[in-house]
Amino acid sequence: MRLGHVIGKVTLSQQDPAYKGGRFLLVQPLDKAKYQGAAMTPLAKGMSLVVYDNLGAGQGHVIGFTEGAEATAPFDNPTPVDAFNAALIDQIFYNPPAAK
Amino acid sequence: MILARVDGVVVTTICHPSMVGCRSIICQPLDENGKEEGTPILAIDPLSAGLHERVLVSTDGSHTRDHVGDPKSPLRNMIMAIVDKEEASV
């Protein structure tokens, strides 16, 4: 699971029937600076991905999403999903040891 | 398995039901001589590892699903062991 910052929403017009009722977020994974509390500004050059969401994350939320085979686990019938939003993050306590 | 260092904790209330009650911690993967490698990842922690401890993180989703007892859980990373001592013997 990785942390990501929600920077937008994706609405589909034509979609696979397995996605009925699905909600998609545009998410940018956090780099190390943002873990330490740097501003959550979307990086122009950052890599962003689309995450399936049923927890109701909005713009600006930090979410924990999983990728790969585990992203398809919560679905009853097999759906083509690459990333699944598993948690809305309330607080991040992050203090790495001082760089030696 | 990934050798990682525990760098922090994450608090979440709205999450997948299989995550409720699990302690989710931030792990920083380390390379063989202990330097940081890549960005931190999240893992659930049944062993309650302390801060800055080195742990082994398993990325086997099926074992994690058995552990949390929910075959539909999206969880993957889980702490398998807390490292006491490591030697890079060539």
Image (cartoon, coloured by chain):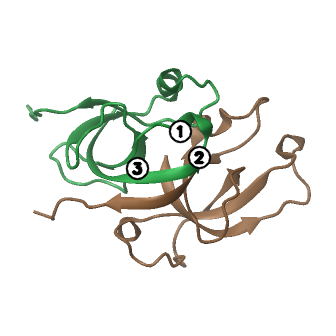
User: Color used for chain B?
Assistant: green
Place of residue B25 in the rendered image (x, y in percent of width and height, measured from the top left): 37, 46
Q: Do marks 2 and 3 share a subunit?
A: yes
Q: CA distance from mark 2 to mark 1?
A: 7 Å
Look at the numbered discs 2 and 1 and tell me whether their residues touch, using CB distance below 8 Å: yes
Compared across the picture, whether B26 is left or right of A78 comes to left
Return the residue nearer the eye: A31 or B18.
B18
Q: Do marks 2 and 1 share a subunit?
A: yes
Residue carrying label 3: B41
At x 73%, y 34%, the residue is A75
Residue carrying label 2: B15
Quarter of image, res A51: bottom right
Q: Earlier in the sequence, mark 3 or mark 1?
A: 1
Residue carrying label 1: B20
Q: Secondary structure at mark 1?
A: loop
Query: For mark 3, does the 10 Å Cα neighbourhood hold few (<14), some (14 to 19), or many (20 or more) residues?
Result: some
Q: Secondary structure at mark 2?
A: strand
Place of residue B19 in the rendered image (x, y in percent of width and height, measured from the top left): 53, 38
At x 30%, y 36%, the residue is B48
Chain brown in the figure, letter: A
The disc labelled 1 sits on which kind of residue? Answer: Val
Place of residue A21 in the rendered image (x, y in percent of width and height, measured from the top left): 85, 49
State whether residue A55 is above or below residue B54: below
The disc labelled 2 sits on which kind of residue? Answer: Cys
Q: CA distance from mark 3 to mark 1?
A: 18 Å
Compared across the picture, whether A15 is left or right of B24 comes to right
State whether residue A80 is above or below residue B51: above
